Image (tube, grey):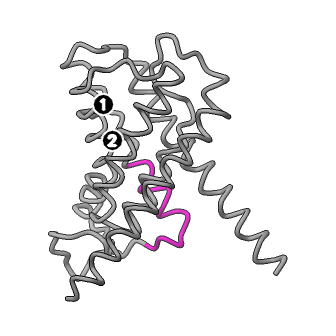
Amino acid sequence: MNPVSDLKYFLEVSITTFISFNLLYVIWIFFIISSETASGFNGSIMYVPHAARVLTICYFGIAAIPALFAAHVFSTIVIGGAYGLNNLPLFDLFGTSFLSTICVFIALYAMAGLGFKIRTLPFYKFTKDSVYLDLRNHKHIIMVTVFSAAVHSLSLYVYNFLRAISSNPEMFIRFFVGDILGTLVTIFTLSFMLFAFFRER
């Protein structure tokens, strides 16, 4: 192991993750949230930044987690705060950001328990019957998206309920549906753009 190479890789992953999440957050703010009501906000019906969670954790693994957490906190305070979307105390902001950051990681471990494996998943012993997740396969990405959306929406709903922030069941539904729709729209849009770009060349 080369410490310099490891540090360089970590920095590259961190910068890519941080920029990707914040870019999608800005896109979400301007194109999605403007058509939704921020008053009594219980989750977006198309949360495109979830795509950054799915893709960065799937491709970079645990190395993306610190930057992803930082991106959650930064985007919520700086960008979301400017649009009145951040009404949480700092403790709850950190709590919800942490749950949002690790939801894909937890989902991948749940899928690993069902026999699916991915090379970026550490600390897990796979069997010879394990099925590799192919990140070039849209079906596998969709499966990760659905699992992570379920983990994310459930964990945030429980957290908000226990902290007496919100007990509205609509929050669970909107987070679950919003994460799935946002990720699928983002991924298929990127795929179409890349296909058109390379076709032209």
Closer to the camera in the image, 32 or 168: 32
Q: Is residue 37 above or below residue 31?
A: above
Q: Earlier in the sequence, mark 2 or mark 1?
A: 2
Closer to the camera in the image, 98 or 158: 98
Please report the residue visible at 43 percent of the width from the left and 48 percent of the height from the top: 146
Residue ranking furthest to the right: 200
Cα distance, mark 2 to mark 1? 8 Å
**Residue that label 2 marks:** 100
The location of residue 6, given as percent across then percent down, is: 27, 79
The location of residue 128, given as percent across then percent down, is: 23, 83
Q: Is residue 15 above or below residue 172?
A: below
Disc 1, SS:
helix
| Left or right for 84, reference 97 | right
Q: Main secondary structure of the magenta part?
A: helix
**Residue that label 1 marks:** 156
**Could you tell me which quadrant the C terminus lies in?**
bottom right
The residue stretch that appears in magenta: 134-147
Please report the residue visible at 77 percent of the width from the left and 71 percent of the height from the top: 197
| Left or right for 100, reference 143 | left
Q: Is residue 108 magenta?
A: no
Residues packed near mark 2 inside 10 Å, few (<14), some (14 to 19) or many (20 plus): many
